[in-house]
Amino acid sequence: MALSNIYQQIPKRYVLSLLGFFGLFNAFVLRSNLSIAIVAMITPTIDNSSDNMTIMIPAVYNWSTTTRGYILASFFYGYCIAVILAGLLATRFGGRILLGGGVGLCACLTLFTPLCARNGSGALMFLRVLEGISSSCIYPSLHSIWSKWAPKQDKSKLATLTFSGAYTGTFVTMLFGGVIAVDWSWEWVFYLSGISSLSWVLIWFYFTAETPSAHTTISHEEARYIEDNIVEVISQKDTIPWKDILTSLPVWAIIAAHFGTNWAIYTMFTELPTFLVRALGFRVDTAGLLAALPWLLLAISVYLTGIISDKLVEKYSILYIRKFIMSISFAIIAFGFLLITVLDNDDRALIVIGITIVIGACGLAWASFGVNHLDIGGHYAAVLMGMSNCIGSTPGFIVPVITGYTVQNSDLKREWNNIFIIPIFISVAALMFYTFFGAGELQLWASNSSDEHQRVMNNPVVSRDISEHTTN
């Protein structure tokens, strides 16, 4: 009874943010599990169990660097193909069902990873493409949800808490994935992540609702507060204003920032465990630990920057804060990659520090452009996120392929330097474009033209009247 009373007192928008945190947590566990497991799959092991004998056990799979690149990239083929459609679906049907369904489907597919791997790299790539398609709805769904649940005073704080779940999930995967692969087997990396994600799906559907007015346990005061403090951005148009969106420079500024940030993130996301093991000589389990720690910093930096942003916009314009934070983020990212590039193998500790700097700085950028869709697009935020996530996620398959062709001998750091130089130039270009063309206010094409509330594609905004709620 006590727990029930506590739950009743907690604002439901914060409950939603916390559940969204764990949703992204599980989604990124499913996305990142192969990055750490594949290292164990391709690395020979040493068996010292026999007396005075050391037995070298061959790697489970002898995939070339090019093949590994395509395997790691395959998730993002499906992801980028479907993410714009996911934005449309989230706008049309709402984000709650799409988010829970997407994570649930990806979790079910993940359970079949060991079986597909045993049937060859082609089967594994096909499975990862399907996982990418099922995961494509995650961010558009969240933006659809927050366009209806986030009061303007709490927008950055609520959204960035949810975003931080993604990188906490990556942290946990890298931290424990290597240990699980070494002490248990690499198959359990996929089994455990699938089971965890399916458990979250059940909790998500039980405790959430599409809108505040549809929530069965929200207080009348909170529901009224949310709906009174959301900038009303619902268009009277029956169709999405594609021409206005596609010709909007502020939209393309977000896309440029998304692309630049994700190039840095996916360079580390897909390649870091392999780089640490092959080029720097760390053990698989140690590499997992070292690869994990920067993602925890990223998760923290996303959320803290969101809180700071909400405080700063009380004194300064949203546009100024977004551009200021983006400038700090990209400057640090470029510096971190430069540090990694100029150091030698002997400076392993400094290289790890450089890696940590790069990944942590990406959190500042995500807390800026990741909320900017809501600033300029309002109810169309899911569509904008679908667009920016489609183009912004292309580094997910470009980076592994480039790495596969460029780094022919993954034991040589000088070959990896070519991969680390690229994001320096991309970061500078993305920052310049965002600085010139970014915006912080609701765009004209996203504005509501009357007091009558009507959702895109003729969906009703409110599923039932707020007055049906009772005060808790």
Image (cartoon, rainbow, N blue to C red):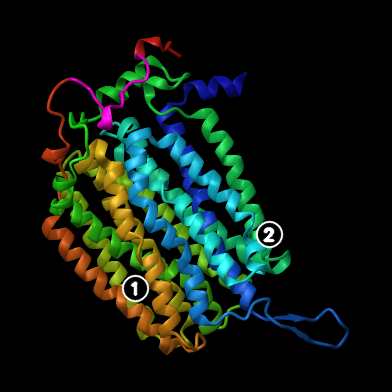
The amino acid type of the residue labelled 2 equals Trp
SS state under label 2? helix
For the point 50% across and 21% down, which residue is it?
8
| Mark 1 closeness class: few <14, some 14–19, many ≥20 residues within 10 Å | many
Sequence-wise, the earlier of marks 1 and 2 is 2
Residue 167 visible, this orientation: yes
Position of residue 218 measured from the top left corner of the image (x, y, whole percent): 43, 20
The vertical placement of 376 against 178, above or below, is above
State the residue position of label 2. Answer: 188
Q: Does the magenta stretch include residue 441?
A: no
Picture quadrant of residue 278: bottom right
The vertical placement of 302 against 18, above or below, is below
Position of residue 313 measured from the top left corner of the image (x, y, whole percent): 20, 42
| Mark 2 closeness class: few <14, some 14–19, many ≥20 residues within 10 Å | some
State the residue position of label 1. Answer: 336
Q: Which of 297 and 464 is in front in this view?
A: 464
Q: Is residue 454 magenta?
A: yes
The amino acid type of the residue labelled 1 equals Gly
Tell whether 46 sits left or right of 319: right
Residue range (magenta): 452-465
